[in-house]
Image: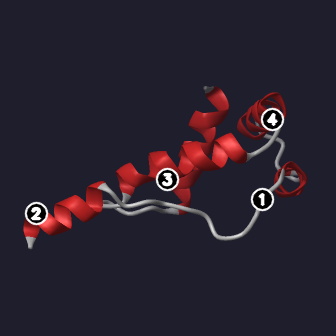
Amino acid sequence: MNQLARFLAEHIVVDFDGGLDIDQVRKFLRDEDSRESRVLLNKLIEDKGVDELMITVADCLKEHIRTGITEDTIRQQLVTYGDS
């Protein structure tokens, strides 16, 4: 049972329900005038969309499944992505 649980935890896939596009991101960040939000938006413009963001953040969040995925964890991944 332990090996099965470990295998499943190591091979879990994180995905996001619903679509997200650059215009929605702009709306979410509109009222937030922080360095992180500007950097993230610039990165998304450079990447020509949010597809790479969604894949990268979902992949990085897999590391946090055992300890828990919180809004703070997701925010930190967004900051890290923007800085990359």
Residue closest to the eye, 74 or 22: 22
Q: Split into 4 quadrants, where in the image is the C terminus?
A: top right
Neighbor class of circle 1 (other Cα within 10 Å; few <14, some 14-19, many 20+) is: few
Q: Nearer the viewer, mark 1 or mark 4?
A: 1
Q: Is residue 40 above or below residue 13?
A: above
Name which residue lies at 28% across and 55% down: 10
Neighbor class of circle 2 (other Cα within 10 Å; few <14, some 14-19, many 20+) is: few
Residue beneath disc 2: 3
The quadrant in which residue 42 appears is top right
Q: Which mark is residue 5?
A: none
- Amino acid at circle 2: Gln
Mark 2 near mark 4, Cβ–Cβ under 8 Å? no
Give the percent coordinates (x, y) of residue 26. 88, 50
Mark 4: secondary structure = helix
Residue beneath disc 4: 38
Give the percent coordinates (x, y) of residue 17. 64, 70
Please report whichever mark, 2 or 1, sits nearer to the chain's N-terminal start: 2
Q: Nearer the viewer, mark 2 or mark 4?
A: 2
Q: Which mark is residue 20?
A: 1
- Amino acid at circle 1: Leu
Q: CA distance from mark 2 to mark 3?
A: 27 Å
